[in-house]
Image (spheres, rainbow, N blue to C red):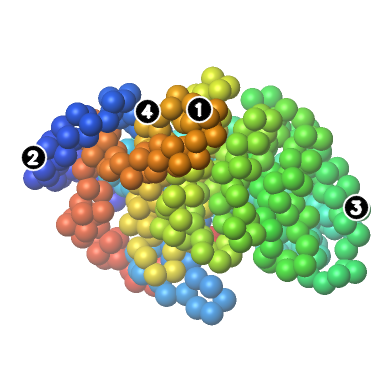
């Protein structure tokens, strides 16, 4: 289902007066307001194809209804979200959950909805119905060469699907690891995984990147074979210059300093991209910025500083993706909130007075340094984010319009209450 342009215009008309006064105040008080709005309009966040239904946990799953029944409907839902915020212009597919049976049709449908194909995701953490060999004891790490071969071939197949759709990157997240001491030879697991990744790397088209995503634990609870940024950096350094580390915010041990990890990977030219979400305990996959918004700001602060130091293009030189699952929220409202939180953190980082911060650091003026950062974090940049939407033809208040137009109710009417989207 699409949302008519006139409905967005009428919605904006009703909110314009209030928005104008807020934006005028922001423009008057935020020196770089105009350049920030421009950067915000260019900044697109890819939406995971596996997060358009209601997720769940092993304890239960409570469907909200109207979930997409196939890849076509997933593209329509992301197209609808993109129409509402004009900041979600890409979809990240997960194979085999979203096999594009008819690639040219899928490509055309995505284009109609203003969507590009971001990183493809392989899946060797589940056994598929028609699969020969099980991944119970891992995929690329597996002691059985035939299982490793099966996993390598799957990743090469995913690259082929992506190439047909115009994607230029592959994300490899391996659930491989062990649950008990003694179960695994860590060195052999590393070596097997590295040689598997090297075969996949060789199959990458010239203009492609491979993102090696690390995770501290789950589903293995004693060791994970790509368990932290150091291990991922080891793999990507040995693989070559098309290999980068992917940082999923929920994949760290409690209290890890993620902004420091980001700054060092960026410094080394090995930061490939992000899976944005938030968490309080484990890999909770909650709405970005919903638990630790200051951490999200600090991460973007390192990104802006580090990318500018390397002359990188903020909008295109890293993979900006969400990876979340929704247990109690409407998936599209949750994704809209995540995109908003990411743009707010980016805008706040852009207004950080980096010159004054450098001076405060030079003077070891710790109080001043914190004041500079927290001034940026405490500055309300929402009028700038809304103005960027307005100029891009999107809605000033995406969630309000989503609700006023009763879009979920319409999706339930069209699709039913019991439809289940493939994914987590
Ligand atoms: C693993 C992960 C990975 C995806 C999966 C859906 O926790 O973050 O990125 O493949 O979630
Ligand atoms: Mn992830």
In depth, the one of 363 and 361 nearer the eye is 363
Q: Farthest top residue?
A: 311
In depth, the one of 264 and 142 nearer the eye is 264
- First in sequence, mark 4 or 3: give its number: 4
Identify the residue shown where x is 85% and y is 50%: 190
- First in sequence, mark 1 or 3: give its number: 3
- Residue 39: mark: 4
Identify the residue shown where x is 62% and y is 54%: 256
Q: Left or right: where does residue 79 sit relative to residue 157?
A: left
Q: Left or right: where does residue 218 sit relative to residue 360?
A: right
Identify the residue shown where x is 88% and y is 57%: 186
Q: Are marks 2 and 3 in contact (CB under 8 Å)?
A: no
How far apart are labels 2 and 1 at the CA level?
39 Å
How far apart are labels 1 and 4 at the CA level?
23 Å
How far apart are labels 1 and 3 at the CA level?
42 Å
Label 2 element class: helix
Q: Identify residue for label 2.
A: 17
Identify the residue shown where x is 82% and y is 72%: 180
How far apart are labels 2 and 3 at the CA level?
63 Å
How far apart are labels 2 and 4 at the CA level?
24 Å
- Residue 358: mark: 1
In the image, residue 371 above or below residue 202: below
In depth, the one of 133 and 54 nearer the eye is 54
Q: Left or right: where does residue 335 sit relative to residue 263?
A: left
């Amino acid at each position: 289902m699409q949302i008519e342009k006139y409905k967005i215009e009428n919605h904006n008309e009703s909110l314009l007066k209030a928005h104008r006064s807020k934006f005028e105040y922001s423009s008057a008080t935020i020196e770089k307001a105009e350049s920030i709005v421009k950067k915000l309009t260019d900044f697109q966040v890819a939406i995971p194809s596996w997060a358009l239904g209601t997720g769940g946990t092993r304890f239960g799953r409570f469907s909200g209804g109207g979930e997409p029944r196939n890849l076509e409907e997933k593209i329509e839902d992301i197209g609808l979200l993109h129409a509402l915020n004009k900041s979600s212009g890409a979809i990240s597919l997960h194979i085999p959950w979203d096999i594009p049976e008819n690639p040219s049709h899928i490509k055309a449908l995505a284009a109609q909805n203003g969507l590009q194909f971001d990183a493809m995701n392989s899946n060797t953490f589940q056994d598929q119905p028609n699969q020969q060999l099980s991944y119970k004891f891992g995929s690329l790490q597996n002691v059985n060469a035939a299982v490793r071969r099966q996993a390598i071939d799957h990743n090469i197949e995913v690259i082929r699907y992506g190439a047909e759709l115009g994607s230029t990157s592959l994300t490899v997240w391996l659930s491989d690891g062990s649950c008990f001491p003694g179960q695994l030879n860590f060195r052999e697991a590393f070596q097997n995984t590295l040689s598997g990744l090297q075969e996949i790397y060789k199959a990458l088209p010239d203009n492609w990147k491979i993102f090696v995503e690390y995770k501290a634990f789950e589903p293995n609870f004693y060791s994970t074979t790509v368990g932290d940024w150091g291990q991922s950096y080891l793999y990507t350094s040995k693989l070559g210059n098309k290999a980068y580390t992917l940082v999923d915010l929920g994949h760290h041990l409690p209290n890890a300093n993620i902004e420091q990890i980001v700054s060092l990977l960026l410094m080394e030219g090995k930061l490939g991209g992000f899976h944005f979400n938030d968490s309080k305990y484990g890999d909770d996959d909650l709405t970005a910025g919903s638990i630790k918004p200051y951490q999200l700001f600090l991460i973007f602060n390192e990104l802006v500083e580090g990318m500018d130091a390397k002359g990188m293009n903020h909008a295109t030189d890293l993979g900006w993706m969400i990876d979340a699952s929704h247990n109690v929220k409407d998936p599209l409202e949750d994704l809209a909130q995540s995109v908003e939180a990411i743009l707010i953190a980016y805008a706040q980082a852009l207004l950080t007075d980096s010159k004054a911060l450098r001076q405060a650091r030079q003077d070891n003026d710790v109080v001043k340094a914190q004041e500079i950062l927290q001034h940026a974090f405490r500055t309300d940049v929402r009028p700038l984010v809304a103005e960027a939407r307005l100029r891009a033809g999107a809605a000033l208040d995406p969630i309000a319009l989503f609700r006023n137009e009763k879009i979920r109710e319409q999706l339930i009417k069209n699709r039913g209450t019991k439809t289940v989207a493939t994914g987590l």
